Image: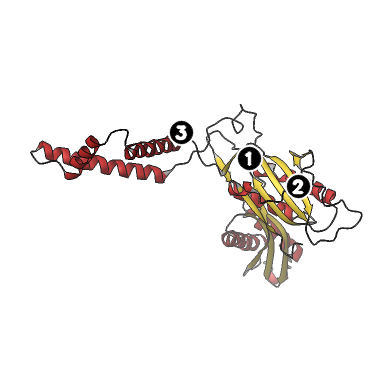
Amino acid sequence: MTVPAAGRGTTTVAPRAVRRIAERAAAEALPDGGSVIRGSAAVRGATARIAVGVRLPYPLRADEAAQRIRERAETRTAALTGLSVPRAEVRVDALSVAAPPPVPEAEPGPPGDEGGSGPRIRAQRRVPAAVLAAVGAAACGLLLVDVIAVRFGGAPAGWRTAVVDWAAAHGPADTAVRLAGVGAALVGAWLLGCALLPGLRRRLRMAAPAPEVRAALDRTAAARILRERALGVPGVVQARVSVRRRRARVRAGVGYGRLEEVRAEVVRVLGASLPELGLRRTPALRVRVRREPGRRTPETEVPEAADVPTVAGRPTAAVPWPTDVDRDGAEDGTQDGPRNSGEA
């Protein structure tokens, strides 16, 4: 005797179980570095509605990842529960940035080297090479055409006879000949410099994980990063940063707070930020602070003349605040300017 289906009992899947199944199904479709934050489920009759909140790694196409997670959660939940899942909702609640790989410590190199082995990145100098090639090709082409014409019985070109006549009438003592020789020597020295010197003085060499990998950071970008970190220190309302190959100079204007405390915090923050730039040789840090004009100074604070520079995080002799414009900014990456009112 066969018992009808209605008389054999019913099976009920609790919303909590549906939620756990949906979370596990969504986790199966997550990319590396992603995680499920929370999930929810509602069961009504033979239909279940599920929603899952996830954390995705950055950078990633969020729409494509969410589509894969939604399809996996719908099909897997329906197969394991026997319920109909018309649509699953996927919410991207957060993004996570993977930690960068550890930068290998640079080994000390010989004097004049940037630290570590491997050649520096050299400037390609496409414009000088193209101009030199074009001028050489044009001169050689004109001379070759004239020589071929003479070999076939033609008369030499007028420009060649004019040059020969002028050279025969003027000797080394003439001013025009000397000036032409000086100009040719300068052009030759410039071309030798382009061929031998690596160039790219405005870029700082970065540490690379492998010998065949070479990377460089622009000084302006490094100065901008350090300036933003300095402006994040409480009390700093203005900052001027210049970054060279061996030194990073910071001039901070303090609007409130004790000068000694603000300077110590700037040194601590920037001292921790310099290794994060990933440079092969970490530049020495030099910090100067001063009270901004027009700011009220409490009697308990350090007077305005207490500007204490540091070199590589160690205090040195006090150096007065310079009254003229920093001339390093025209030569290397410099970022300065007042902090906006929202940050102050």
**Disc 3 marks which amino acid?**
Leu
Q: Pointer 2: residues within 10 angstroms few (<14), some, or many (20+)?
A: many
The answer to whether residue 33 is visible is no
Residue 337 % position (x, y): 67, 58
Residue assigned mark 2: 288
Instruction: Between label 3 and label 2, give the one nearer the viewer.
Output: 2
Residue 318 lies, with reference to residue 297, above or below; the image says above
Residues tagged 2 and 1 counted as in contact (Cβ below 8 A): no
- Name which quarter of the figure residue 88 lies in: bottom right
| Distance in Å between CA atoms under marks 1 and 3 | 24 Å
Residue 63 lies, with reference to residue 278, above or below; the image says below
Mark 2: which secondary structure? strand
| Distance in Å between CA atoms under marks 3 and 2 | 38 Å
Q: Pointer 3: residues within 10 angstroms few (<14), some, or many (20+)?
A: few
The answer to which of 89 and 274 lies nearer the viewer is 274
Mark 2 / mark 1, whichever is N-terminal:
1
Mark 1 / mark 3, whichever is N-terminal:
3
**Disc 2 marks which amino acid?**
Arg
Residues tagged 1 and 3 counted as in contact (Cβ below 8 A): no
| Distance in Å between CA atoms under marks 2 and 1 | 23 Å
Residue 83 % position (x, y): 66, 67
Residue 18 % position (x, y): 71, 63
Q: Residue at x 74, y 52 (%)?
A: 252
- Name which quarter of the figure residue 26 lies in: bottom right
Instruction: Between label 2 and label 1, give the one nearer the viewer.
Output: 2
Residue assigned mark 3: 196
Instruction: Between label 1 and label 3, give the one nearer the viewer.
Output: 3
Q: Residue at x 69, y 45 (%)?
A: 249
The answer to which of 226 and 316 lies nearer the viewer is 316
Quarter of the image where the N terminus is located? bottom right
Residue assigned mark 1: 279
